[in-house]
Image (cartoon, rainbow, N blue to C red):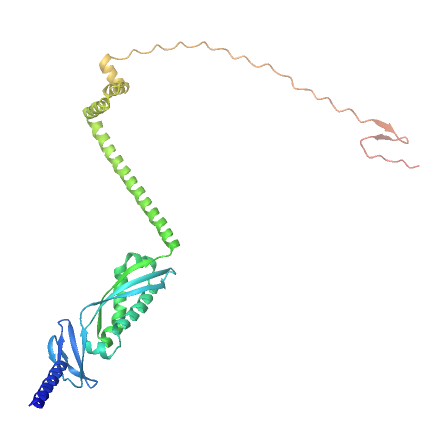
């Protein structure tokens, strides 16, 4: 009887062990891939309690959640020959558990290597301005480059790639700071010039309005006086009324017709007496200077022959 009980207990224990080896719990975010003696079974086990053969079957669970993989900083040279260091982060998930287990070994490490090489390639084709101003374009290019070798052969989908930080050399950062400062100064000058232009237009419009309405200019003058007196000054200088200045200006521009209509014709000026004519006195005649006649050339006798000194000297025959 005791031996029978022992055998029964042993059988029950073996059965419990076999049941424990046959049951597998698959979570909602997992997929179960079963290998029977190393051969892949076509059926993929979904979430829940699944039964497999206790001998010969082995289940591998693959998470189908989105995984986050950080890419270590990578030194690279841009298209415009600027050396910088870039790090990024990759979001991917498994869409085919069979390919992720069979076609690649340690797929997170494989994705990390692909991301590093793709990051260097994309950075080398872009310039510095594009990296700093248009990161969305760089991220989309990285995703496109990484999708080709991972989705079809490995069963992985790259959902998103983000560049976290771009480390620039110290000299480049100083140059960019100077450029940004110059750009801000240029904008400030443009805004100040635009404000001066608008203010001059407003002042010109106000001056035209006041010129058409003299009372407005007087009211502005009174307002200025009130503003000055509110400062508790001991001396207040009142300007000369503008209307009086305009009156004198109008009087100075009065035409002859208006003056004649207002005061009568202007008296004619007396004619100036004619001055007696002065007879013209002829100028005394000046005698022409006399030029003395040239003295006659001396004449001398040479061998009984008269010879002039101006003529060629002749020699008489001996």
- Quadrant assignment, res 123: bottom left
Against 231, residue 100 (above or below) is below
Mark yes or no: residue 187 visible: yes
Residue 204 lies, in percent from the top left, at 25, 33
Decide if residue 130 is in sight here: no
Image coordinates of residue 269 in percent, x first then y, are 33, 11
Q: Position of residue 64 (x, y in %)?
A: 17, 71
Residue furthest out toward the left? 1
Q: Quadrant of the N terminus?
A: bottom left
Relative height, residue 44 to residue 210 (above, below): below
Tell which residue pokes out farthest to the right in this image: 318
Residue 209 lies in what quarter of the image?
Answer: top left
Whether residue 107 sits left or right of residue 308 in the image: it is: left
Front in this rendered view, residue 249 or 181: 181
- Quarter of the image where the C terminus is located: top right
| x and y percentages locating residue 252 in the rendered image | 28, 19
- Depth check, front residue: 262 or 251: 251
Is 55 drawn above or below residue 46 in the view shown? below
Residue at the limit of the structure toward the front, as seen here: 2
Taking the image as shown, residue 118 lies to the left or right of residue 210, namely: right
Q: Nearer the viewer, residue 129 or 282?
A: 129
User: Relative to the observer, which residue lies in front, 1 or 225?
Assistant: 1
How many numbered tags mark residues here?
Answer: 0
């Amino acid at each position: 009887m005791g031996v029978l009980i022992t055998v029964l207990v042993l059988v029950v224990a073996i059965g419990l062990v076999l049941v424990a080896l046959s049951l597998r719990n698959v979570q909602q975010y997992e997929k179960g891939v079963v290998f029977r003696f190393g051969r892949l079974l076509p059926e993929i086990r979904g979430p829940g309690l699944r039964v497999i053969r206790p001998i010969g079957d082995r289940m591998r669970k693959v998470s189908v959640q989105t995984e986050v993989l950080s890419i270590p900083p990578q030194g690279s040279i841009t298209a415009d020959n600027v050396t910088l260091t870039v790090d990024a982060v990759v979001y991917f998930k498994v869409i085919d558990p069979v390919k992720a287990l069979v076609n690649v070994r340690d797929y997170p490490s494989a994705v990390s290597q692909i991301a590093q090489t793709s990051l260097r390639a994309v950075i080398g084709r872009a310039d510095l301005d594009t990296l700093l101003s248009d990161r969305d374009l760089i991220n989309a290019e990285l995703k496109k480059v990484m999708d080709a070798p991972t989705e079809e052969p490995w069963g992985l989908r790259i959902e998103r790639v983000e560049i976290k930080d771009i480390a620039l050399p110290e000299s480049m950062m100083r140059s960019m700071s100077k450029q940004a400062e110059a750009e801000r100064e240029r904008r400030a000058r443009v805004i100040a010039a635009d404000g001066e232009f608008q203010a001059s237009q407003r002042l010109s419009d106000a001056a035209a309005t006041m010129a058409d309405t003299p009372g407005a200019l007087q009211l502005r003058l009174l307002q200025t006086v009130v503003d000055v007196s509110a400062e508790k000054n001991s001396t207040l200088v009142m300007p000369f009324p503008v209307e009086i200045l305009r009156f004198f200006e109008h009087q100075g521009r009065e035409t002859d017709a208006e003056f004649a209509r207002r005061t009568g014709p202007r008296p004619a000026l007396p004619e100036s007496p004619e001055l007696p004519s002065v007879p013209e006195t002829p100028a005394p005649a000046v005698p022409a200077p006399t030029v003395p006649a040239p003295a006659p050339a001396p004449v001398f006798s040479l061998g009984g022959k008269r010879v002039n000194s101006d003529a060629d000297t002749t020699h008489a025959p001996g």
